[in-house]
Image (cartoon, rainbow, N blue to C red):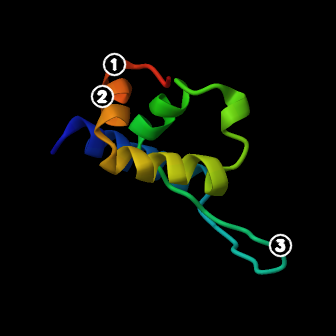
């Protein structure tokens, strides 16, 4: 098992231990649940906080773009956002 997978499983176990019940509601407008790997949070730390105001409108498109754009992948591996 890879280290990233172990960390993810450990995080889920800890979260479930701390919050054993989960209530989902449709009473809130535009509610979403996002689950990311630790690497995504590390990547987020390379961005200017002003550039990530919305997960849906800023982060997700940025991650998708990085999946197919070689130059962005290279910058990510260098630990830079721009």
Q: Horizontal and vertical percent for residue 80?
A: 44, 20
Label number found at residue 1: none
Which residue is the extreme one toward the bottom?
26
Q: Which element type, helix, strand or loop, lies under badge 3? A: loop
Whether the residues at callouts 1 and 2 have beta carbons within 8 Å, the answer is: yes
| Residue topped by disc 1 | 78
Work out whether 77 lies above or below 68: above
Q: Which element type, helix, strand or loop, lies under badge 1? A: helix
User: N-terminal of the two: label 2 or label 3?
Assistant: 3
* Rendered image quadrant of residue 19: bottom right
Apparent side of residue 72 relative to residue 41 in the rendered image (left or right):
left
Q: Residue at x 45, y 44 (%)?
A: 11
Rounded to the nearest whole Å, what is the CA distance between mark 2 and mark 3?
A: 39 Å
Rounded to the nearest whole Å, what is the CA distance between mark 3 and mark 1?
A: 39 Å
Circle nearer the viewer, 2 or 3:
2
Q: Which element type, helix, strand or loop, lies under badge 2? A: helix
* Rendered image quadrant of residue 57: bottom right
Q: Residue at x 28, y 38 (%)?
A: 70
Label number found at residue 74: 2
Quarter of the image that includes the N terminus: top left
Depth order, front residue of 25/56: 56
Apparent side of residue 53 relative to residue 63 in the rendered image (left or right):
right
User: N-terminal of the two: label 3 or label 1?
Assistant: 3
Q: Residues within 10 Å of mark 2 (few under 14, many from 20)?
A: few
| Residue topped by disc 3 | 28
Q: Horizontal and vertical percent for residue 63?
A: 45, 47
Rounded to the nearest whole Å, what is the CA distance between mark 1 and mark 2?
A: 6 Å
Depth order, front residue of 80/43: 80
């Amino acid at each position: 098992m890879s280290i990233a997978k172990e960390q993810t499983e450990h995080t889920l176990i800890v979260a479930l231990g701390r919050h054993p019940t989960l209530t989902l509601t449709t009473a809130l407008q535009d509610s979403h649940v996002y689950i990311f790997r630790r690497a995504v949070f590390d990547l987020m730390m390379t961005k200017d906080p002003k550039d990530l105001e919305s997960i849906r409108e800023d982060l997700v498109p940025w991650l998708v773009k990085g999946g197919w754009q070689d130059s962005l992948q290279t910058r990510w591996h260098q630990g830079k956002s721009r």
